[in-house]
C-alpha cells in the first residue's frame, strides 16, 4: 500500500467523514472505494481536446460584419461597464 496526503475543502472533508461514519468505514476505506468507483465510471483514455470556442454563426443575430475578436472585445467592454455601474 502507498501512503499519501491530500488536501480537501473543509466542507467536503466534513461530508466525507460523515459519509464514512454512517457506513462504519475508515476514511482510508472511503477514499479507496471512491477511487475505485472513479476508475469504473470514467474511461481509461482521456478525451481528445476540443477545438477553440467560436461564436455560433447566424444570419439573424444582428452582428453582421463583426469578427469573433471584435465580438469578444465588445463583450469585455459590456462586462466592464456593468461592473463599474456605468
Image (cartoon, rainbow, N blue to C red):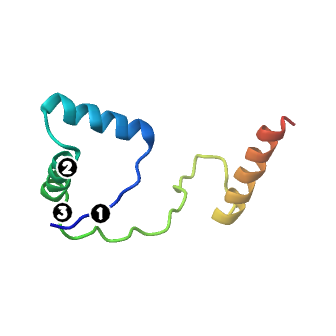
Please name whichever residue, 65 or 16, is drawn nearer the observer in this view of the structure.
Answer: 16
Residue 43 - label: 3
The residue that appears at 15% across and 48% down in the rendered structure is 29
Please report whichever mark, 2 or 3, sits nearer to the chain's N-terminal start.
2
Nearer to us of marks 2 and 1 is: 1
The residue that appears at 13% across and 32% down in the rendered structure is 23
Nearer to us of marks 3 and 1 is: 1
Please report whichever mark, 2 or 1, sits nearer to the chain's N-terminal start.
1
The residue that disc 2 covers is: 34
Left or right: 84, with 45 as reference point: right
Q: Residues within 10 Å of mark 3 (few under 14, many from 20)?
A: few
Please report whichever mark, 3 or 1, sits nearer to the chain's N-terminal start.
1
The residue that appears at 18% across and 28% down in the rendered structure is 22
Nearer to us of marks 2 and 3 is: 2
Q: Position of residue 81 (x, y in %)?
A: 81, 42
Q: Secondary structure at mark 3?
A: loop
Q: Position of residue 4 (x, y in %)?
A: 29, 63
The residue that appears at 19% across and 45% down in the rendered structure is 30
Q: Position of residue 41 (x, y in %)?
A: 16, 53
Q: Secondary structure at mark 1?
A: loop
Q: Secondary structure at mark 2?
A: helix
The residue that disc 1 covers is: 4
Quadrant of the image occupied by residue 6: bottom left
Considering the image in quadrants, where does the C terminus appear? top right
Amino acid at each position: 500500500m502507498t501512503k499519501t496526503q491530500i488536501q480537501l475543502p473543509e466542507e467536503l472533508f466534513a461530508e466525507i467523514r460523515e459519509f464514512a461514519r454512517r457506513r462504519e468505514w475508515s476514511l482510508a476505506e472511503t477514499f479507496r472505494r471512491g477511487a475505485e468507483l472513479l476508475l469504473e465510471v470514467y474511461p481509461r483514455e482521456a478525451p481528445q481536446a476540443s477545438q477553440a470556442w467560436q461564436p455560433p454563426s447566424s444570419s439573424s443575430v444582428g452582428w453582421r460584419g463583426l469578427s469573433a475578436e471584435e465580438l469578444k472585445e465588445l463583450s469585455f467592454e459590456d462586462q466592464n461597464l456593468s461592473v463599474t455601474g456605468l
